Amino acid sequence: MNCKPRRQQLRAILNGTQCIHPGSVYDPISARVAEDLGFEAGMFAGSIASLTVLGAPDIIVLTLTEFADQARRICRAGELPLIVDADHGYGNALNVNRCVEELENAGVACLTIEDTLLPRRFGNHGTEFLQVAEGVGKMKAAIAGRQDPDLIILGRTSAVGPNGVEDGIMRARAYLDAGVDGIMFVGVKTRAELEAIASELDAPIMLGGSGAELQDPNYLGECGVRVSLQGHQPFMAAVQAMHDTLKALREGMAPAQLQGVASADLIRQLTRDDSYQAWQEDFLS
């Protein structure tokens, strides 16, 4: 993989004026679908990784090795710049340093490190956040772990919802001062919240879990948002399609009667069959 061009491509987006919606991907085929459809970037979420790799809920039971291995499979499948949700960096600041090293080697273009206290402490049932000083230590460790300066590292916080906009801005400023390239805010719901954030921060913003008011990419671009997630419906749609297909077969439907099955032409396109055929001619004849 030649990772630098895709990282530079995504950096150009962060340094630009437009907001993009990345395609939510989870394996090599889904990444190729997103690339072929023209998405500027892909997004591989921790929650989707837990579902894809383990069939487990998003409660931080996935390991860094499992996450990085799947990210590597996605990255090697094409040229789509990949953004990944690295959760809490899989431990303390030293683990964050290692996390960045592994994900950079996996080929990702951008990763986010959050300040949520994860995994959940014994006896606690709500969302807890790191002290800002510990969050800053994680961001500094992430920067120190980066070898390719084009790799994008974003601080991430979901503090705006439970703690208020002021706390979210304070945390974002501290992480930017530590050297991250931008901030991902999760759970910003209103234009008033976003505008308050944008007025205080001079840095690229990424949004996840946004409210209904924050769906217009032109407006988001004007507020400094460069990446806005739309959720992870592609994986959910694939699960539903798999379930319905297996259910129909189990109940006696003939394979020829199934609807919504990928054509042979689409499979050939997504498996890059032409390239493999050419390689066979070049190397096996």
Image (spheres, rainbow, N blue to C red):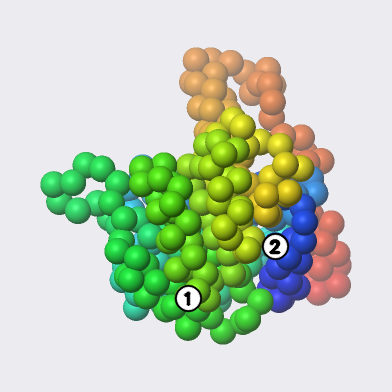
Indicate which label's residue lies in the foreground, 2 or 1: 1
Residue nearest the observer in this picture, 155 or 81: 155
Residue nearest the observer in this picture, 96 or 275: 96
Q: Earlier in the sequence, mark 2 or mark 1?
A: 2
Gap between marks 2 and 1 measured at Cα: 18 Å
Q: Residue furthest top?
A: 252
Secondary structure under tag 1 reads helix
Quarter of the N terminus within the rendering:
bottom right
Check disc 1 and give the amino acid type: Ala
- Return the residue at label 1: 178
Quarter of the C terminus within the rendering:
bottom right
User: Residue 14, labelled with which disc?
Assistant: 2
Other-residue count near label 1 (Cα within 10 Å), few / some / many at <14 / 14–19 / ≥20: some
Residue nearest the observer in this picture, 10 or 72: 10
Tell me whether the residue at label 2 lies in contact with that at label 1, contact meaning CB atoms closer than 8 angstroms. Answer: no
| Residue appearing at x 21%, y 42% in the figure | 125
Check disc 2 and give the amino acid type: Leu
